[in-house]
Image (cartoon, helix red, strand yellow):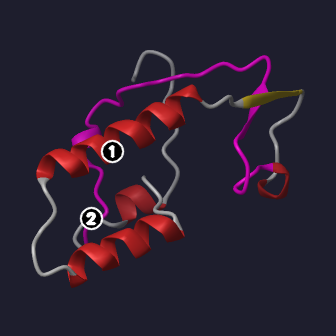
Amino acid sequence: MERFTAADVLALAEIAKAKTPPKISALLEDVRESSRSELASKVDVDDVDHIPSLGEMYVDKRTWLRVSPVVAVAADLKNSTALSTGDKYVNTSARPTKPRPGQA
């Protein structure tokens, strides 16, 4: 999810106040420049040997925490379309689902 800075919000407020809308090409150029800047900036990566707690994670600076070794498992559970978060079948998703070998 994209987060807006205070400068972005102020720029949008100024655009809203303007009597004539800005040119699309000027808006696209602003986005292009800010995207280039974002992609060119360095991201620091810190190696950790445990799953970090929320307090160890950063929200105020551009630093990633790399956990090693990590194994990611993806499974398509059989009959998973019966799982629901709606009112009618909420209990199907409210309790843990334990797949067994050969049944996923």
Dot 1: what SS?
A: helix
Alpha carbon of mark 1 to alpha carbon of mark 2: how far? 43 Å
Relative placement, left or right, of 22 versus 72 is left
Q: Is residue 76 above or below residue 51?
A: above
Relative placement, left or right, of 46 versus 91 is right
Q: Earlier in the sequence, mark 1 or mark 2?
A: 1
The residue at 70%/55% (across/down) is 59
Quadrant of the frame with the C terminus: top left
Relative placement, left or right, of 53 versus 39 is right
Relative placement, left or right, of 99 versus 19 is right
In front of the other: 102 or 52: 52
Residue bearing the label numbered 1:
31
Task: Name the spot of residue 33 as percent of width and height, x first.
Answer: 40, 38
Q: Is residue 76 above or below residue 63?
A: above
Task: Name the spot of residue 88 as percent of width and height, x first.
Answer: 22, 70
Residue bearing the label numbered 2:
89
Dot 2: what SS?
A: loop
- Where residue 11 sits, quadrant-wise, is bottom left
Q: Which residues are magenta?
A: 57-86
In front of the other: 21 or 35: 21
The dot on residue 53 is none
The residue at 36%/57% (across/down) is 92
Task: Name the spot of residue 50 as percent of width and height, x first.
Answer: 87, 33
Mark 1 or mark 2, whichever is nearer to me = 1
Residue type indicated by callout 2: Tyr
The residue at 85%/51% (across/down) is 56
Task: Name the spot of residue 55 as percent of width and height, x first.
Answer: 83, 58
